[in-house]
C-alpha cells in the first residue's frame, strides 16, 4: 500500500521555465515557484515568509508549462513530493526534495497597458448594467 503523498501549492514562477527532452524523447519542464505566507507575530503585527520550491512536469503538461509559464506568472500546482538522493564526488550523501506536478493551473494575466478604447467599452457595459438594470449584453 502506498502512503499518501499529495500537495497543493500556489505561488509565482521565479524564472522562466526550462524545457528539456529526455533521451527517449519525453518532454520535461522544470521551474521554481515562490510561495508567500503571512502570519501574526508576538507583537500583534504581521510577518512575511517566502519559501521556494522546484517543480518538474512531464509529457504534455511539460509542453503546456513551457508554452504558458513565465517569470512572475501565478500558478497552482497539484502534485507529489519526490526525494532525489545521490553520493557526491566527495563521498558525502546528498538529497533534494522537489515537486512532481500532476496538474498545473495558470492564474490569469491582466494587461496593465490597456488603451482608451478598452476603458470606454468597459464604461459602456457598466453604464448599461448599472444604470439601465438590464442583463449584460452577450459578446
Image (tube, rainbow, N blue to C red):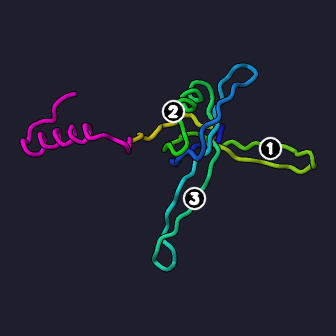
Queried whether the magenta region covers residue 120, the answer comes back as yes
Q: Is residue 135 left or right of residue 42?
A: left
Residue 69 - label:
none
* Residue found at x 52% / y 48%: 11
Neighbor class of circle 2 (other Cα within 10 Å; few <14, some 14-19, many 20+) is few
Quadrant in which the N terminus is drawn: top right
**Can residue 98 be seen in the rendering of this structure?**
yes
Instruction: Quarter of the image for the C terminus: give it.
Output: top left
Percent across and percent down for residue 37 are: 52, 60
Q: Name the residue that disc number 1 marks.
A: 85
Tell me if residue 4 can be seen.
no
* Residue designated by label 3: 50
Residue 53 percent coordinates (x, y): 62, 48
Per the rendered image, the range of residues in magenta is 111-139
Which residue, as the protein is rendered here, is positioned at the far top?
A: 24
Residue placed under numbered mark 2 in the picture: 68
Magenta-drawn stretch contains 124: yes
Q: What is the CA distance from the residue labelled 1 to the residue labelled 2? A: 31 Å
Front label number (3 vs 2): 2
Q: Residue at x 59, y 37 (%)?
A: 101
Q: Quadrant of residue 63?
A: top right
Q: In this view of the protein, which residue sits in the foreground, 71 or 85?
A: 71
* SS for dot 2: helix
Q: Could you classify mark 1 by the number of other residues whose Cα lies within 10 Å: few (under 14), some (14-19), or many (20 or more)? A: few
Say which of 81 and 39 sits in front: 39
25 and 9: which one is in front? 25
Residue found at the far left of this picture: 132
Residue 76 shown left or right of residue 134 in the figure? right
Percent coordinates x, y for residue 44 in the rendering: 45, 77
Placement of 33 over or under 125, stated as above or below: below
Amino acid at each position: 500500500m502506498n502512503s499518501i503523498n499529495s500537495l497543493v501549492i500556489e505561488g509565482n514562477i521565479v524564472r522562466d521555465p526550462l524545457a528539456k527532452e529526455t533521451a527517449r524523447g519525453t518532454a520535461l519542464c522544470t521551474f521554481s515557484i515562490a510561495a508567500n505566507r503571512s502570519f501574526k507575530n508576538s507583537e500583534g503585527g504581521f510577518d512575511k515568509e517566502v519559501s521556494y520550491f522546484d517543480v518538474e512536469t512531464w509529457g504534455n503538461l511539460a509542453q503546456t508549462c513551457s508554452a504558458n509559464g513565465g517569470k512572475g506568472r501565478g500558478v497552482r500546482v497539484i502534485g507529489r513530493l519526490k526525494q532525489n538522493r545521490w553520493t557526491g564526488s566527495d563521498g558525502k550523501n546528498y538529497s533534494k526534495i522537489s515537486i512532481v506536478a500532476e496538474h498545473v493551473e495558470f492564474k490569469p494575466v491582466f494587461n496593465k497597458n490597456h488603451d482608451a478604447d478598452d476603458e470606454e467599452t468597459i464604461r459602456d457595459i457598466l453604464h448599461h448594467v448599472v444604470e439601465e438594470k438590464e442583463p449584460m449584453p452577450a459578446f
